[in-house]
Image: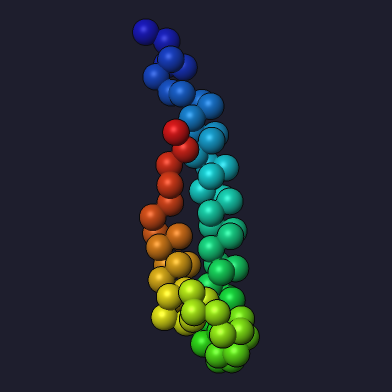
Amino acid sequence: MHQDSLVNHSLVKAWCISAFVWFAIFPLVGVTVAIKFHNPEFLGNISWLSFGRVRPVPVNGVLYQPSPD
């Protein structure tokens, strides 16, 4: 059996690209949440942008990455 047939290279490449994209986006969201923590008026008075609602977003985004299907 040839070793190259055991690895789906396109799937591994897609997973790595997805991981890099998610690890680039969600830390930026974390910085935004940190700004919101120190300056509560930063994003206005929109209820779904309150600190308590956006706080878990960067943690969940970094820990629970979606897999490319």
Above or below: residue 69 compared with residue 25: above
- Whether residue 18 is situated above or below residue 30 in the rendered picture: above
Residue situated in front as seen by the camera: 33 or 47: 47
Asked where in the image residue 64 lies, by quadrant, the reply is bottom left
How is the structure coloured here? rainbow
Query: Residue drawn at (39%, 59%), measured in percent from left and top?
Result: 63
The quadrant in which the N terminus is found is: top left
- Report the front residue among 1 and 10: 10
Could you tell me which residue is drawn at 43 percent across and 75 percent down? 53
Q: Quadrant of residue 31?
A: bottom right
Question: Is 1 on the left or on the right of 38, as rendered?
Answer: left
Q: Nearer the viewer, residue 51 or 1?
A: 51
| In the foreground, 59 or 2 | 59
Residue that appears at 39% across and 19% down = 6
**How far from the left and from the top, in percent, is residue 20?**
56, 50
In this view, 40 is above or below 59:
below
Indicate whether 24 appears above or below 36: above
Residue 49 x/y as whole percent: 52, 76
Q: Is residue 35 visible?
A: no
Count of all numbered marks drawn on residues in the image:
0
> Is there any visible trace of residue 12 in the rendered image?
yes
Residue occupying the far top of the picture: 1
Task: Quadrant for the C terminus, please.
Answer: top left
Residue 26 locus on image (x, y percent): 53, 63
Farthest front residue in view = 46
Q: Position of residue 45 (x, y in %)?
A: 56, 85
